[in-house]
Image: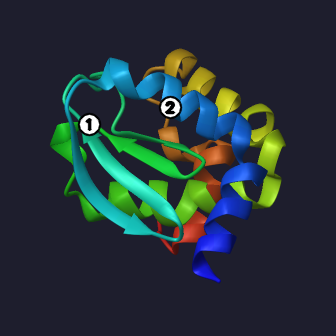
Amino acid sequence: MRKLLFILLFLWQLPQNLVALLVMPFLGRLTFVDYRHYCFGFAGKRFPKNASGISLGSFAFFHPDYAHDAHTIRHEMDGHTVDSKLFGPLYLLIIGIPSILHLIFKKKGSNYYDFYTERRANRHAGLER
């Protein structure tokens, strides 16, 4: 039953899973971090310096400096992955792309976690900010 659920979730989240598979080779050597909620977490040796983590369907990737940070892992693997499962093929449009654009263009001094995508992830993960 778990294998069937994993396959169905993988297909439901196919756009973000394909992006994750395309991104993997660019992250360098991957180190396994965790598995939860049908999501594999990895630290990428060449993860972008301005980000701590990213969730793409059945995968979460972390900057090596944040690979064991409980808040970051919960935010990505217990937070964003919930929206990925809820929105399925629309996740990238509703959560993924706006979240990345917010990271790139946020105003200096503003709280990153005030943006709706990050507030949602924290709420799903039970994190207070």
Q: What residue sits 61% from the left and 40% below the top?
A: 17
Percent x, y for residue 57? Answer: 60, 48
Count of marks placed on residues: 2
Is the residue 8 above or below the residue 97 in the image? below
User: Is residue 95 left or right of 75 when viewed as pictured?
Assistant: right
Is the residue 110 above or below the residue 121 in the image? above
Q: Which residue is mark 2?
A: 21
Q: What residue sits 31% from the left and 63% below the top?
A: 34
The alpha-carbon separation of the residues under discs 2 and 1 comes to 17 Å
Q: Is residue 46 visible?
A: yes
Residue 80 sits in which quadrant? bottom right
Residue neighbourhood size for the residue with mark 2, other residues' Cα within 10 Å, grouped as few (<14), some (14–19), many (≥20) = few
Percent x, y for residue 37? Answer: 52, 71
Label 2 SS: helix
Along the viewing direction, whichever of 75 and 61 lies nearer the viewer: 61
Q: Residue furthest bottom?
A: 1
Q: Which residue is mark 1?
A: 63
Q: Mark 2 is on which residue type? A: Leu
In front: label 2 or label 1: 2
Q: What residue sits 68% from the left and 72% below the top?
A: 5
Q: Mark 1 is on which residue type? A: His
Along the viewing direction, whichever of 55 and 58 lies nearer the viewer: 58
